[in-house]
Amino acid sequence: MASLGKLNALTVLYSTPQGIYLDGGEHGEILLPNRYVPSGTKLDEKLEVFIYRDSEDRIIATTERPLAMVGGFATLEVVSVNRNVGAFLNWGLPKDLLLPFREQAEPVRVRDRVVAYVMVDEKTDRIIATTKLNKHLSRQQPPFKKAQAVNLLITHRTPLGYNAIIEGTHIGLLYHTNVGAPLQAGQQLKGFVAAIHPGGKIDLSLDASGYQRVAPLTDRILQALRAGGGRLDFDDDSPPEAIRLRFDTSKKAFKQALGALFRQRRIRFTHPAGIEAVDIREPVSGDWQPGA
């Protein structure tokens, strides 16, 4: 049976001037319009297609991939608002995705980017979006481990920090003290599980801890120095936002990595602001010298 709002492998039944029809099981025969039919498609062949409803509410197939599927979270842009039904989101298909007023956690406006969950409305059997996210997050014990690298989707700012969806299943918290630069709702980034508390609450970090954090970062800094001819316009005083953009890490972790490289005599600090690679084969003032 074809699943609405998801990818399906469906068998080609026959061809018509409008396109080919696929076996949709309980949904009956489903049209795949000509513009989406792959070249060389044959009868009885299976095609991977996405199933949704078109502007006339008919179930239809496409080989295009939407930005989100049923059961998933995504950051989508509001493209229009209809005062009678709700807002419409761009999800990468010709027919925009409806976000009904009743499913809006807060009112949205055109050009807003919202974090939404995609689902099938039980009453209408149509694919819709909701920004009421909590009821669609897992209440099961988190399967994650401390220090595990995870994918995060920022949902909103709180007095303590930022809530983030972890691997599309659970919610966690990034404390302000662990975030060097402001984050935006809908932002996707890599993070780490800092702690899992009794009851399933999860603390997050944008950086690994200890040696796991510093060692790979020192390698990236040295690579950047080589690519920059031995010099970089970054140091302890660089803005957190610039550090995050360039090295995908926090200012705290960056300063720790610079300290490690400085102690190893791999870099020196320059004026004006920046760092410079040190050739460890060349003697440095204060080093022991034969006969000294």
Image (spheres, rainbow, N blue to C red):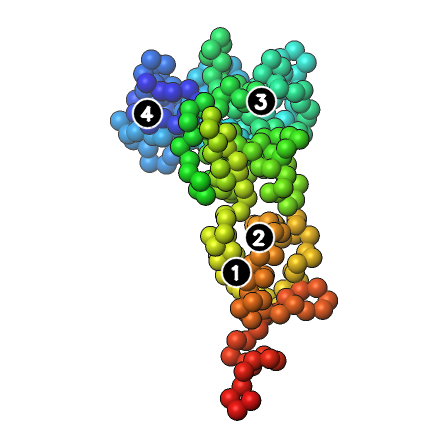
Which residue, given by chain and number where applicable, does mark 3 sit on? 131
Which of the labelled discs sits on residue 253, or is there none?
2
Left or right position of 259 against 127: right
Q: Position of residue 172 (x, y in %)?
A: 53, 32
**Earlier-in-chain disc, 2 versus 4:** 4
**Earlier-in-chain disc, 4 versus 1:** 4
Which residue, given by chain and number where applicable, does mark 4 sit on? 10
**Earlier-in-chain disc, 4 versus 3:** 4
* Disc 3 packing (10 Å; few <14; some 14–19; many ≥20): many
Gap between marks 1 and 3 measured at Cα: 40 Å
Residue at 42 percent of width and 38 percent of height: 145
Which of the labelled discs sits on residue 62, or is there none?
none
Which residue, given by chain and number where applicable, does mark 1 sit on? 218
Gap between marks 3 and 2 measured at Cα: 34 Å
Which residue type carries mark 3? Thr
As drawn, the residue found furthest toward the front would be 292
The local secondary structure at tag 1 comes to helix
Which residue type carries mark 2? Ala
**Earlier-in-chain disc, 1 versus 2:** 1
